[in-house]
Amino acid sequence: MVKIAILMKRRPGLSVEDFQDHLRTRYGPPALRGPGLRRYVQSCALPQGYVRGELLFDAVGEMWFDSLDDYERCIRSPEFAAARDDEGTFLDRSLTVAMPVDVHVIKDGAVPDGAVKNIEFVNRRPGMGIEPFRSYWRNVHGPLAAKIPPIRRYEQNHLALGEYQKGAAPPYDGLAITWFTSTTEMRSGAVTAEYAATRADEAHFLPAGHLPIIITREHVVL
């Protein structure tokens, strides 16, 4: 099974509240009619995330299919046309990104009801090759980060290798997705020794500074 992550930015002038309502109540139901869609989850940024200004993305949609061919057939199908046509009414298409990804479960824990979901937009360190980056992230850094006590579940979504064959450099090399019981629990992890070790390791494969994130709560549509 393959997963497509859709990084969504709302249309200029549309409020966060109206964007989230549109995504859930108007876009979601028609999207479900697309043939071959096996699972669909929408994760919208928490309102308090906007206190300091705009976020890089307002939501991430995750769609699962049996194959990439099934995904292509779905988005081009007459059944998906209503959802596709609706995108221009609430999305900034110039900033919205579709990412086929390979999912690696690093910590296979249960997600509690009402959990918060941290989505980090990952790029590799300048000059680092794709394969060394993917290997280090998964096999060295992943096990370190999985030790941070409040993390309930941890997945790495590595951009599908075929995306690097399309000419232009992809905007992101992957997504790091972690679930926590609450934002309070998430903050508590940032003062642990395990978190400090994880941060210290980032210089080996990530660019300097913090990578952008959005903190969300997910809504399972299908």
Image (tube, rainbow, N blue to C red):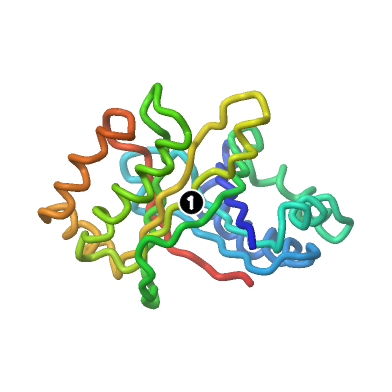
Q: Percent position (x, y) of residue 75? A: 78, 52
Specify the quadrant of the image occupied by residue 108: bottom left
Residue at the farthest right position: 78
The correct choice, above or below, for 3 with respect to 214 in the image is: below
The correct choice, above or below, for 111 with respect to 126 in the image is: below
- Residue 14 shown left or right of residue 124 in the figure: right
Q: Disc 1 on helix, strand or loop?
A: strand
Question: Where does the C terminus fall, quadrant-wise?
Answer: bottom right
- Residue 194 shown left or right of residue 123 in the figure: left
Q: Nearer the viewer, residue 37 or 183?
A: 37
Q: Percent position (x, y) of residue 166? A: 68, 30
Q: How packed is label 1: few (under 14 Cα within 10 Å), some, or many (20 or more)?
A: many
Q: Percent position (x, y) of residue 216? A: 42, 57
Amino acid at the residue labelled 1:
Asn
Residue drawn 30% across and 48% down?
A: 140
Residue at the farthest top position: 127
The correct choice, above or below, for 120 with respect to 222 in the image is: above
- Look at mark 1 in the image and give the residue it sits on: 157
Specify the quadrant of the image occupied by residue 51: top left
The correct choice, above or below, for 27 with respect to 114 in the image is: above
Residue drawn 73% across and 61% down?
A: 31
Residue drawn 55% across and 42% down?
A: 9
Question: Where does the N terminus fall, quadrant-wise?
Answer: bottom right
- Residue 120 shown left or right of residue 93 in the figure: left
Q: Nearer the viewer, residue 39 or 96?
A: 39
Counting the numbered discs, the total is: 1
Q: Percent position (x, y) of residue 189? A: 18, 58
